[in-house]
Image: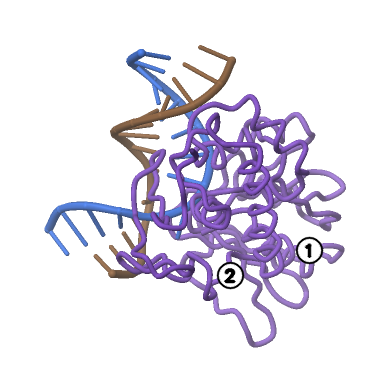
Chain colours: A purple, B blue, C brown
DNA sequence: CAGGATGTTGGGTC
DNA sequence: CGACCCAACATCCT
């Protein structure tokens, strides 16, 4: 689930409950989730410190203290949950707990694909995240079109390539291509200038709404709403949706609304 | 029971 | 180097 908009939701949770407040205790029920440190190392790094800022780049959440920086990635099933005064149940999948005065911030994950890292400086950060393109939410239309210029191959694989553009995963990419009426296997080189602009506008529109919700909205009109159904019907024209493998993932798309470039 | 699932990495290929 | 493909990772759901 966690793509750019979900991670933004987690960032807001982190910001609201854990920034500028004393961190009372760190515990790590699932130590394997720490990728470049140990429970002791994490405790030492965060002990008697407070988080000062949070930011997000693509699907990465970066939370800085005045010393070390905590780097979080959520993999396929990670989430950040706040539990305090009467809400937010603990779970056996809680891997890291940041205990504050009024509650606990829980990094939770079922499949342990994500993880937490400690970084000292920007160069360390880059090593942890690997190469990241500009954030899909931050990029403007001119820069986006410029990037498309020197990209080959399929459009969906470009959108999902974190080193080309950071933050979009399988579901947001499908949603964007649906909005822009482009087939997922279309070649970038075949997209006309007006289709490229429609693609950027579609991305903007999808992300604006997803960012408002802090996740992909599960609402009528969105593919997300019918994604689980087989085959499911197009929210726009009621045609049966296709589910096809494209660049290693399942693309959901409407063969009637979404068109191969001429 | 088998197959598939939102993400990334690392290997190998062209 | 750039792009593609696959397998692997751990676990749950259909």
- Chain letter of mark 1 equals A
| Residue A32 can be seen, yes or no | no
Q: Which residue is mark 2?
A: A217
Q: What percent of the width, then of the height, locates residue A34?
A: 57, 46
Residue at x 54%, y 26% (from the top left corner): A152
Q: CA distance from mark 1 to mark 2?
A: 22 Å
Q: What percent of the width, then of the height, locates residue A142?
A: 77, 38
Residue A121 is left or right of residue A177, and the answer is right
Residue A222 is left or right of residue A6, and the answer is left
Residue at x 41%, y 55% (from the top left corner): A252
Mark in front: 1 vs 2: 2
Label whose residue precedes the other's in the sequence (1 or 2): 1
Q: Is residue A215 above or below residue A48?
A: below
Circle on res. A241: none
Q: Residues within 10 Å of mark 1 (few under 14, many from 20)?
A: some
- Residue furthest bottom in the image: A86
Q: What percent of the width, then of the height, locates residue A146?
A: 72, 31
Q: Residues within 10 Å of mark 2 (few under 14, many from 20)?
A: some
- Residue A246 occupies quadrant: top left
- Residue furthest front in the image: A262
- Chain letter of mark 2 equals A
Q: Nearer the viewer, residue A123 or A153?
A: A153
Q: Secondary structure at mark 1?
A: helix
Circle on res. A15: 1
Q: Is residue A151 above or below residue A140?
A: above
Q: Secondary structure at mark 2?
A: loop
């Amino acid at each position: 689930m966690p793509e750019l908009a979900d991670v933004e939701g987690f960032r807001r949770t982190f910001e609201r409950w854990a920034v500028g407040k004393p961190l009372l205790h760190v515990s790590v029920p699932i130590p394997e989730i720490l990728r470049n440190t140990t429970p002791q190392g994490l405790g030492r790094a965060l002990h008697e410190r407070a988080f000062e800022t949070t930011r997000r780049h693509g699907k990465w959440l970066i939370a800085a203290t005045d010393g070390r920086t905590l780097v979080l990635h959520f993999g396929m099933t990670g989430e950040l949950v706040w539990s305090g005064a009467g809400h937010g149940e603990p779970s056996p999948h809680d891997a890291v707990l940041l205990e504050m005065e009024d509650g606990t911030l829980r990094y939770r994950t079922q499949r342990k694909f994500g993880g937490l890292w400690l970084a000292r400086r920007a160069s360390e950060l880059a090593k942890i995240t690997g190469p990241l393109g500009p954030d899909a939410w931050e990029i403007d239309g001119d820069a986006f079109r410029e990037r498309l210029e020197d990209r080959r191959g399929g459009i969906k694989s470009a959108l999902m390539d974190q080193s080309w553009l950071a933050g979009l995963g399988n579901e947001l990419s499908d949603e964007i291509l649906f909005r822009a009426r482009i087939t997922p296997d279309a070649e970038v080189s075949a997209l006309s200038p007006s289709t490229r602009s429609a693609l950027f506008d579609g991305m903007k529109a999808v992300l604006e709404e997803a960012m408002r919700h802090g996740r992909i909205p599960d609402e009528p009109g969105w593919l997300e709403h019918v994604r689980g159904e087989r085959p499911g019907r197009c929210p726009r024209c009621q045609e049966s949706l296709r589910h096809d493998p494209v660049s290693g993932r399942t693309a959901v798309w409407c063969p009637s609304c979404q068109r191969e470039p001429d």
